[in-house]
Image (cartoon, rainbow, N blue to C red):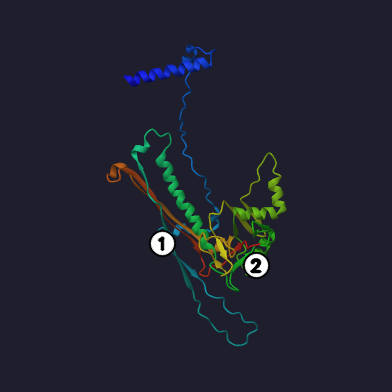
Amino acid sequence: MKKLFSFVALFAIILVSVVTACPAVSVGNILAIAPLATQKAVFLNVLKEEYHEIDTWLNEATDLSSFVVDGQTLKFPEGGAYPKVYKDRTEDVDSMEPTESVHSEDLNVYDTQNYKIRNIWLHALPFNKVQFYVQKAAEAIKIEVVKDGAYNIMPSTVLSNDKRIVIPATGSAEDGRKTICLADIKTLAKQCDSKRFFKNGRNLVLPSDMWWGLVNDNKVLEMQIANQQKVGNYNPDIVEYYGIKIHKSYGDDFGLTWDTSTNKKGAQGAVLTDTVAPCGLFFCSDAIYRADGEFKMFYNNMENNPTGRADEFGYQHRQKTGHQYADEKYTGVIYLPKA
């Protein structure tokens, strides 16, 4: 009771003080002041996430998915050497036995973690939480498939007189490194011709920073992008120069590097140094493959999951992107050396 009287007395003192300080304001006016507006929490029915573009350049590879159904190992028979050709020979022509070799590729198996969603978190939600994370699990595998595919296609090293090309960029300096320029594309095309690469299906995939370096060097492409008309759209993801289709990759998800000290590819996602340089990926469509198995979804609903008492689900996928030739033929890189 004493506490109640103390609170009433304190409120009276404060009220009198306010009225004294503001004589134009009556006690009635003070008591009639409207309360603050109540904030409302509104949940939209779309669950937001960080945007991630999944590159589509892998579609340029020869699709061998139809052969994945019955097994996880692909066999690539490789024909033997050309026969000798004799000119104006007067003796009997000798013979040779044709020989073939077999190049094998085992598919990888990708498993996502299981999402576990308890029933208590699904009540009164304006969005479909389970459906969203089902799609997110499948996309997680696709992202890894593209990253691993790029690393698998990249040549391990370069040897003299083989069908692998490794060249440095020679453009202007930016952030301490050379940038790729149109002259480098010309050099790549020239080496492809001299090493007798496939004439068709030549592809170069550039991380976005390397792509924009090429745009800055190419005045025609730069002006086409800068001088876009108000109607229409010119925002290329793919351009073609000297018979090479050049793809823009978003970000630097590959983590592809070339170690100039060892003349070999760096570890996947290696830290850049003076000798470990970022690079773009070159390949010929008929020399590489991609093979996709089905996406298998594993789902255990709450009613059948008494231990976890939650919906649990995840994905498994068999896939491999690699070389159709044992010697990593018809591939290459353009790397950015220190300026």
Location of residue 193 by image quarter: bottom right
Q: Earlier in the sequence, mark 1 or mark 2?
A: 1
Q: Contact (CB < 8 A) between labels 1 and 2?
A: no
Residue at the far bottom: name it. Answer: 91
Quick check: 109 left or right of 279?
left
Three-letter code, disc 1: Gln
SS category of the residue bearing label 1: loop
Q: Residue 281: tell me if it is visible.
A: no
Three-letter code, disc 2: Gln
Residue at x 52% of width, y 81% of height: 96
What residue sits right under mark 2 in the picture? 191
Residue at x 48% of width, y 40% of height: 48
Q: Looking at the picture, how far across and down is residue 62, in whole percent?
A: 52, 59
What residue sits right under mark 1 in the picture? 72
Of the two numbered discs 1 and 2 in the rendering, the one whose residue sits closer to the viewer: 2
Residue at x 53% of width, y 16% of height: 22
Q: Nearer the viewer, residue 196 or 310?
A: 310
Residue at x 64% of width, y 46% of height: 235
Q: Looking at the picture, how far across and down is residue 309, in whole percent?
A: 30, 43
Q: Looking at the picture, how far across and down is residue 191, in whole percent?
A: 65, 67
Q: Nearer the viewer, residue 283 or 334?
A: 334
